[in-house]
Image: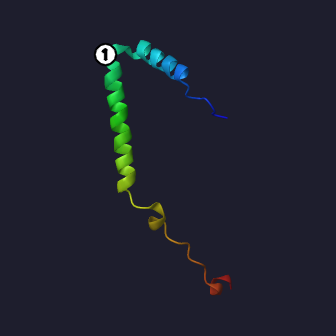
Amino acid sequence: MFEGLFQPMHLLVVFGIALLVFGPKKLPELGKGIGDGIRGFKSAMKDQPNMEDKIPAKEEEDEDDDV
């Protein structure tokens, strides 16, 4: 389904549109901000403990409760 989605010509068109929208002065700042955000997200994911450890196992109900 996504074969050939990021061909070089497509990336050049996207870069060209971004250059027109944001301008040559803002584009490096935008790239730096996105890179910092991705780096921060990755480091937060590494630091976060496994979610399975935080979810308590569902305790089975006692059979006496059915009375």
3 over 19 or under it: above or below: below
Question: Judging from the image, what secondary structure is the residue with disc 1 in?
Answer: helix
Q: Position of residue 50 (x, y in %)?
A: 44, 61
Q: How many marks?
A: 1
Residue shown at 53%/72% (left/top)? 57
The amino acid on which the numbered mark 1 sits, given as a three-letter code, is Lys
Q: Position of residue 31 (x, y in %)?
A: 36, 27
Residue shown at 54%/21% (left/top)? 10
Specify whether 7 is left or right of 67.
left
Specify whether 62 is left or right of 25.
right
28 over 46 or under it: above or below: above
Task: Return the residue nearer the eye: 50 or 10.
Answer: 10
Q: Position of residue 34 (x, y in %)?
A: 37, 32
24 over 66 or under it: above or below: above
Colouring chosen for the image of the structure? rainbow
Residue shown at 43%/12% (left/top)? 20
Residue shown at 37%/54% (left/top)? 46
Q: Residues within 10 Å of mark 1 (few under 14, many from 20)?
A: few
Specify the quadrant that holds the N terminus: top right
The residue singled out by tag 1 in the image is: 25
- Residue 54 falls in image quadrant: bottom left
Specify whether 6 is left or right of 34.
right
Specify the quadrant that holds the C terminus: bottom right
